[in-house]
Amino acid sequence: MRIAAIYDIHGNLPALEAVLQDIALAKVDLVVVGGDMVAGPMPPETLECVLNLTLPVQYIQGNADREVIAQKAGADAGAVPEHVKAITRWVADQLLPEHIQLLASWPPTLTVAMSGLGEILFCHATPRSDTEVFTRVTPEDRLVPAFEGLDARLIICGHTHMQFDRMIGKIRVVNAGSVGMPYGDPGAYWLLIESSVQFMHTLYDRTHAAARILATGYPQAKDFAAHNVLQPPSEAEALDAFAQMM
């Protein structure tokens, strides 16, 4: 069995299309979408692209998906910067009611059994929270409570948009990286899981992708094209920013 884990697409349809070409070449048996699919410049197109796959696909919900659902329901976003609220409102307005129902049906975690690797638990950030922030350099003792008491030997996560592979207690935790909003070298990041876990990095025409994004009505299209497609923040910059959040 081969699984492709694609996380944090964030409405970046050109990046997703490139990754799906590589996934087709890899002849996977299952695609796992690890949350935060639509919150970005091309929400319905990105969702429909995955829905039209002939491969089996399973989904989990990310924090941005949850926030879009809440926005559509008229719920208060709470203490969120106004520019983030504006983005969430715009994304929610692009989606049809059936899209929202689909997002709402996705579970927070997913477990898949694989020969050789045992039970794999897929979650967005940690098994207990879709917003918990940790990276490859977060001290282990701070993370043990988030992962204790679990049967899975391997956990696949995302949320912080940087790939890593580390141990937390006796559990191996691998971050899939981000398809649509990476930190580090430009491109789209994902995982290929078979008898081992392989870090994948798909390159695509970022100049053309930026032009497509600029042609949308996305409120932050210029910033997204410049800083999430053409030249993302470095890993060092991202680690520093996340360190200030923890």
Image: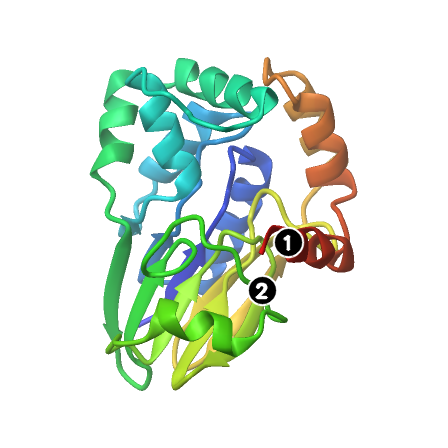
Q: Is residue 114 above or below residue 71?
A: below
For the point 31% across and 62% down, which residue is it?
29
**Of 125 and 110, the residue lying toward us:** 125
For the point 48% across and 56% down, which residue is it?
158
Q: What amino acid does circle 2 point to?
A: Thr
Q: Which residue is mark 2?
A: 135
Q: How is the image coloured?
A: rainbow
Specify the quadrant that holds the C terminus: bottom right
CB under 8 Å between discs 1 and 2: yes
Q: What amino acid does circle 1 point to?
A: Phe
Q: Which residue is mark 1?
A: 242
Q: Residues within 10 Å of mark 1 (few under 14, many from 20)?
A: some
The reply, left or right, for residue 40 in relation to residue 226 is left
- Between the residue at mark 1 and the residue at mark 2, the CA separation in whole angstroms equals 8 Å
**Of 22 and 155, the residue lying toward us:** 155
The reply, left or right, for residue 199 in relation to residue 59 is right
Residue 115 image offset from top left, x and y in percent: 27, 82
